[in-house]
Amino acid sequence: MYVHIGENILVRTFDIITILDKQTMASSDITNEFLETNKKTIVHTENVSYKSIVITKDAIYFSPIASNTLKKRSNKLMVQEY
């Protein structure tokens, strides 16, 4: 199943590693370092403002949808798969 993360982007629930909110990203030096070293895999969306970051096996997405909402969407879909 797929999760809509905003800006017409769908991500497979199986591929999602983590979903981080904007505040966590801003307050963590480790997260900033991770994003800096993996900036080649960042998929830029048209919308400049973002509320969460979705990290998958292949890419990093900045999403305009809140992390709690994305978590609920992915949990519902994961339960439906089994």
Image (spheres, rainbow, N blue to C red):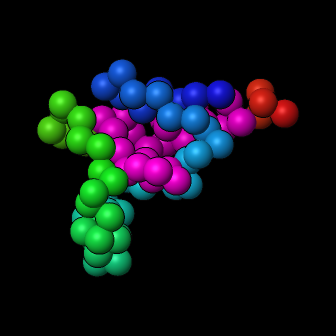
x%, y% of residue 20? 42, 55
Q: Is residue 75 magenta?
A: yes
Q: Is residue 8 above or below residue 32?
A: above
x%, y% of residue 62? 31, 44
Residue drawn at the location 18% of the way across and 32% of the way down: 47
Quadrant of image for the N terminus: top right
x%, y% of residue 81? 78, 30
Specify the segment rendered in magenta.
52-78
Q: Is residue 72 magenta?
A: yes
Quarter assignment of residue 27: bottom left
36 or 50, which lies in front?
A: 36
Residue lying farthest to the left in this orientation: 48
Residue drawn at the location 31% of the way across and 25% of the way down: 7
66 relative to 33 in the view: left or right: right
12 relative to 61 in the view: left or right: right
Quarter assignment of residue 29: bottom left
Quarter assignment of residue 65: top left
Can I make out residue 19 in this image?
A: no
Residue drawn at the location 26% of the way across and 60% of the way down: 39
Q: Is residue 57 above or below residue 32?
A: above
